[in-house]
């Protein structure tokens, strides 16, 4: 089943809470393009509050379409959650201690600048390790998201019939 841009958007919102079944690459990437376009337009016009509301409104359907996309490649949707957690852990390793430095020096901009420079110089290895962990999880997710549809699997029949796409 090939889907166009409009059909993909309709499917994205029609399957708002649907974490089962399969979504094709076209459905996933057209929906992703739609989200990117809407976010860019809202940001371009300085509608940050609306952009924040939009971002909150699409959290559930975005996770749901990722689950379905992973299912389409034969992977459990729980990989989405697992890779997300790994990415957050990596970001925590990178940035977590930085917040302590910021909070301790928030009232003194000169001290904050000095403390941040010192923090970066003394923690470059943990910043690098955290970055590598987050990057690896993101690349792994991307590899799964771009894979062609698997044959019929436990999540449903191949949406393209017998062909892979």
Image: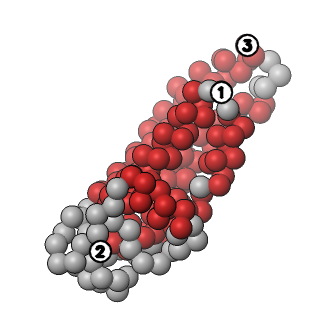
In front: label 2 or label 3: 2
How far is disc 2 from disc 3 in space, using C-alphas? 59 Å
Going by the image, does 151 lie left or right of 90?
left
Find residue 101 and report its horizontal and vertical position in percent: 70, 32
Query: Up-down: is 124 above or below 150?
Result: above
Find residue 73 and report its horizontal and vertical position in percent: 30, 70
The residue tagged 3 is 110
- Please report the residue visible at 49 percent of the width from the left and 61 percent of the height from the top: 10
- Residue occupying the far left of the picture: 163
- Please report the residue visible at 50 percent of the width from the left and 47 percent of the height from the top: 35
Going by the image, does 141 lie left or right of 16?
left
Going by the image, does 118 lie left or right of 36?
right
Q: Which mark is residue 159?
A: 2
The residue tagged 1 is 46
- Please report the residue visible at 77 percent of the width from the left and 25 percent of the height from the top: 105
Residue 164 visible? The answer is yes
- Residue occupying the far front of the picture: 6
């Amino acid at each position: 089943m090939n889907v166009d841009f409009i059909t993909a958007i309709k499917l994205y919102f029609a399957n708002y809470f649907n974490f089962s079944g399969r979504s094709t690459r076209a459905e996933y990437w057209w929906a992703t393009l739609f989200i990117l376009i809407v976010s860019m337009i809202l940001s371009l016009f300085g509608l940050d509050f609306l952009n924040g509301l939009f971002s909150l409104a699409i959290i559930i359907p975005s996770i749901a379409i990722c689950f379905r996309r992973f299912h389409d490649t034969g992977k459990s949707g729980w990989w989405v959650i697992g890779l997300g957690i790994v990415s957050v852990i990596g970001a925590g390793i990178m940035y977590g201690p930085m917040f302590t430095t910021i909070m301790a020096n928030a009232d003194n901009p000169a001290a904050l600048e000095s403390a941040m420079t010192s923090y970066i110089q003394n923690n470059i290895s943990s910043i690098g390790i955290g970055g590598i962990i987050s990057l690896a999880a993101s690349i792994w997710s991307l590899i799964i998201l771009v894979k062609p549809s698997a044959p019929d699997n436990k999540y449903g029949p191949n949406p393209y019939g017998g062909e892979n796409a």
